[in-house]
Image: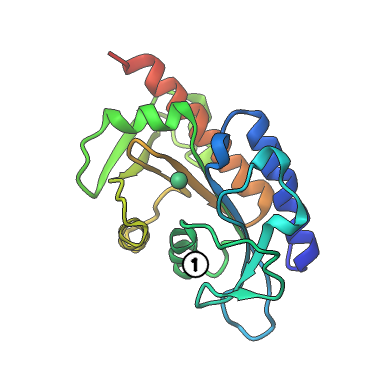
């Protein structure tokens, strides 16, 4: 998806669907798709701040440039407070096309099973669904990174930047007590990684909760 209208249409559909699953309640979460600006600069379509995802419309999607400034119509909307996290991920790899951040019960709770310091991961083994993260070896362990939550969002963005400089991280991470972020080289791959992360976290929480 590189066309702006296609990107906006895709985000409206994904946002409404995730809302129906209970993953974007109370205006939470944010979704983005990279669009081509023809100049080689980062540009992406992203959900605006404080929008009900169950009633998401085309006008609720903003186009932001490399500096996270609105390009074109603002329609009275403001950029998402968590835009800086999306930008850190896009900058880490030019092949990343879509990033979804949602607040689900399972990822919020499973993230509390791990210590808060940076570099910690939720380890999940013995589950067929780890294959959804391209882990095909027998006995593969999915290590889903867990970042500490910070009131100051750019702090989370800088932690995610450090994380993505490491070796072959999974295309998803949790933010402790907050939710998950997953991405992919297409909208459908980002959705798949989000669903896999949700499933694995739901299993981890079911198995380990106090
Ligand atoms: Zn969030």
- Dot 1 falls on a residue whose secondary structure is loop
In this rendering, the answer to whether 101 lies above or below 115 is below
For the N terminus, the quadrant is bottom right
Vertical relation: 6 (above or below) 200: below
Residue sitting at 44 percent across and 63 percent down?
84
Q: Position of residue 25 (x, y in %)?
A: 56, 34
- Residue 149: x, y in percent? 31, 46
Q: Quadrant of residue 62?
A: bottom right
Which residue is at 67% across, 30% downward? Answer: 20
Horizontal side of residue 156 vs 45, given as left or right? left
Residue 201 in the image, given as x and y percentages of width and height: 43, 28
- Circle 1 residue: 93
For the point 48% across and 47% down, which residue is it? 181
The one of 22 and 144 positioned closer to us in this rendering: 22
In the image as oriented, which residue stretches furthest toward the front? Answer: 76
Colour scheme of the rendered structure = rainbow
């Amino acid at each position: 998806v590189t066309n702006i209208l296609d990107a906006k249409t895709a985000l409206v559909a994904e946002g409404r669907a995730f809302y129906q699953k209970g993953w974007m309640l109370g205006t939470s979460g944010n979704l983005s798709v990279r669009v081509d600006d023809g100049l080689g600069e980062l540009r992406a379509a992203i959900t605006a701040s404080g929008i009900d995802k169950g009633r998401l419309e085309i006008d609720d999607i903003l186009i932001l440039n490399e500096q996270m400034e609105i390009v074109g119509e603002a329609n009275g909307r403001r950029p998402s407070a968590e835009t800086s996290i999306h930008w850190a991920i896009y900058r880490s790899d030019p092949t990343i096309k879509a990033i979804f951040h949602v607040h689900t019960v399972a990822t919020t709770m499973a993230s509390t099973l791990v210590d808060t310091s940076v570099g910690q991961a939720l380890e999940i083994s013995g589950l067929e669904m780890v294959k959804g993260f391209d882990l095909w070896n027998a006995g593969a362990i999915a290590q889903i990174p867990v970042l500490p939550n910070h009131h100051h969002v750019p702090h989370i963005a800088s932690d995610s930047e450090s994380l993505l400089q490491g070796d072959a991280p999974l295309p998803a991470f949790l933010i402790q007590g907050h939710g998950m972020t997953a991405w992919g080289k297409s909208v459908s791959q980002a959705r798949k990684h989000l669903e896999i992360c949700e499933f694995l976290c739901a299993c981890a929480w079911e198995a380990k909760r106090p």
